[in-house]
């Protein structure tokens, strides 16, 4: 088992770091990413890019992020908290 | 933020269409002549974007059945089945649909959209997981939203991704509802149903197959992909519509599970909607008889769509999927698709224009739906219009993209 399948704890700072890394690659470093970065408003990504980003994040942490929680996710912090919750529940 | 501020984007998009002189979403068919022909902008136009797969909208027996029902049962039911009661023919159609699928029972809904909305909202709730193919129809997404269910998407037609997500659910997988479609409406591709059934057998769960575009089209008796793939018994719920191959309006769900009947009492889209009119039920019952016996119609449909698909492919167009009655031509961008659509109408061919965000992978599509009622001459004319536009506009092959 690797670190993301449940037997090793992934903590919040690690999750934020992973999201920052993925988003920095996706935006080619154009935007400084922090916890308050608005995933839709600040990054100028289209819906397809956002969906692919979510798929990558899901595979990285071996979780499924329900579409139904996405309306509550605006910032990097919101997403990191949801991922932390889902990783703990898995 | 004012009430109407949210419409600014839509208003700007519509102004842009007006500026370039194209109104793809406001087409008026001034007169409908037959299942495959109408008058648009004053000229006879071949209709190749109707989803009228078996061409039954003008079938004399279906029309006669609807007329008889109008005379004997009136124009409408004026209310819901819960409040006003069911007419005998509502129940007859439900029993006939159940018999057609060799299942215990069926529920009829007032539209195809409401069949998904009503089943999903009646069946699932906030503690349930619904596992959707990402390309599922809006009615499926909306049904889950109304239910408040936990919605997880898997990559379109990707069985490994489905299996991975079922594994992640652990014990919850056994009560998860997997939702897929027989033929996907945008690109015309089929679900890998046998492999999906294998995943269900491995992890448990329930399977809902929406056969909206495959009912009457696939399978010896027209029961859709479940019949063609030989997995009828593995589908816990089959949803379909009356508004495509059956030439009417309405939808249904069939199931062998005894709980289906209870869903009537929990489904708000079923409870709070007027039931289908007598004429609609009558034409649908007649059309179902024709559909079940319609091997000749399916043979004609298959010949028509294979021909158009192979001719468009030979012209060098990028097509969305292997041959099916839905043939999606992928164009390079939105503007190219708009111009192409307008030119087709000017050539006397009506098809559907499909643009992001309604399309998968952000592609711009010209979507044809082929009918058994198209004559060889009409298929040839549609094909000729595409050939002419290919050389005139210098269309280069587009990328289909992946998800």
Image (spheres, rainbow, N blue to C red):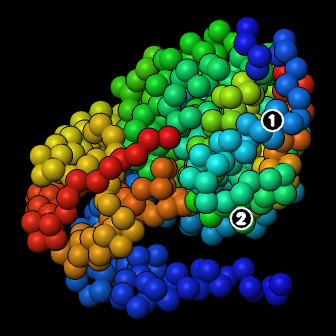
Q: Which residue is mark 1?
A: A15
Circles 2, 1 touching at the beta carbon (< 8 Å): no
B102 vs B186: above or below = above
Question: What's the residue at 36%, 88% (across, down)?
Answer: B21
Name the element at disc 2. loop
Q: Position of residue A49 (x, y in %)?
A: 57, 51
Q: CA distance from mark 2 to mark 1?
A: 20 Å
Q: Residue at x 19, y 63 (%)?
A: B395
In the image, B266 versus B72, the foreground residue is B266
Q: Is residue A18 left or right of residue B59?
A: right
Q: Kindly identify which chain the residue marked by label 2 belongs to.
A: A
Q: Residue at x 11, y 71 (%)?
A: B392
Residue that appears at 77% across and 60% down:
A38
Query: In which image quadrant can residue B177 be found?
Result: top right
Instruction: Please name the residue that numbered disc 2 is placed on.
Output: A42
x and y, in percent, of residue B219 in the image: 39, 27
Q: Which is more toward the observer, B398 or B374?
A: B398
Earlier sequence position, callout 2 versus callout 1? 1
Query: In this rendering, would B126 be left or right of A63?
Result: right
Query: Is residue B119 at all visible to an observer of this figure?
Result: no
* Percent coordinates x, y for residue B97 in the rendering: 57, 35
Tell me, yes or no, if residue B113 can be seen here. yes
């Amino acid at each position: 088992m690797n670190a993301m399948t449940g037997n090793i704890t992934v903590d919040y700072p690690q999750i934020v770091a992973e999201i920052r890394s993925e988003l920095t690659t996706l935006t080619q470093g154009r935007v400084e990413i922090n916890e308050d970065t608005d995933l839709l408003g600040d990054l100028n990504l289209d819906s397809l890019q956002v969906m692919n980003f979510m798929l990558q994040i899901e595979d990285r942490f071996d979780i499924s992020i329900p579409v139904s929680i996405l309306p509550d996710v605006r910032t990097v912090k919101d997403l990191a908290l949801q991922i932390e919750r889902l990783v703990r529940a898995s | 933020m004012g009430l109407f501020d949210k419409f600014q984007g839509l208003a700007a998009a519509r102004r842009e269409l007006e500026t370039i002189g194209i109104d793809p979403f406001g087409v008026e068919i001034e007169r409908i002549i037959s299942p495959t022909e109408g008058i648009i902008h004053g000229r006879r136009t071949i209709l190749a974007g109707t989803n009228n797969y078996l061409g039954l909208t003008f079938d004399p027996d279906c029309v006669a059945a609807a007329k008889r029902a109008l005379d004997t049962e009136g124009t409408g039911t004026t209310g819901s089945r819960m409040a006003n009661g069911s007419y005998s023919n509502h129940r007859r159609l439900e029993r006939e649909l159940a018999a057609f699928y060799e299942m215990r029972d069926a529920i009829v809904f007032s539209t195809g959209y409401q069949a998904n909305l009503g089943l999903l909202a009646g069946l699932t709730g906030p503690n349930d997981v619904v596992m959707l193919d990402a390309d599922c129809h809006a009615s499926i997404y909306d049904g889950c939203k109304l239910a408040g269910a936990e919605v997880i998407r898997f990559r379109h037609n990707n069985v490994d991704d489905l299996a991975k997500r079922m594994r992640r659910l652990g014990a919850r997988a056994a009560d998860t509802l997997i939702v897929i479609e027989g033929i996907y409406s945008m690109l015309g591709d089929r679900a890998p149903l046998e492999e999906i059934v294998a995943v269900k057998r491995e992890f448990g769960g329930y399977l809902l197959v929406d056969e909206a575009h495959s009912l009457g089209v696939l399978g010896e008796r027209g029961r859709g992909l479940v019949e063609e793939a030989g997995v009828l018994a593995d589908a816990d719920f089959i949803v379909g519509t009356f508004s495509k191959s059956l030439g009417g309006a309405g939808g249904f769900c069939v199931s062998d599970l005894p709980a289906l009947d209870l869903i009537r009492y929990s489904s708000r889209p079923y409870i709070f909607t007027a039931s289908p009119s007598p004429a609609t039920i009558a034409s649908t019952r007649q059309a179902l008889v024709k559909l079940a016996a319609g091997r000749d119609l399916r043979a004609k449909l298959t010949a028509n769509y294979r021909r158009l698909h192979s001719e468009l492919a030979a012209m060098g167009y990028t097509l969305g999927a292997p041959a099916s009655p839905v043939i999606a031509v992928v164009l390079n961008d939105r503007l190219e698709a708009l111009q192409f659509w307008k030119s087709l109408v000017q050539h006397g061919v009506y098809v559907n224009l499909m643009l992001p965000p309604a399309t998968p992978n952000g592609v711009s599509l010209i979507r044809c739906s082929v009918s058994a009622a198209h004559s060889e001459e009409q298929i040839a004319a549609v094909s000729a219009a595409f050939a002419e536009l290919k050389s005139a506009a210098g269309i280069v092959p587009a990328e289909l993209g992946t998800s």
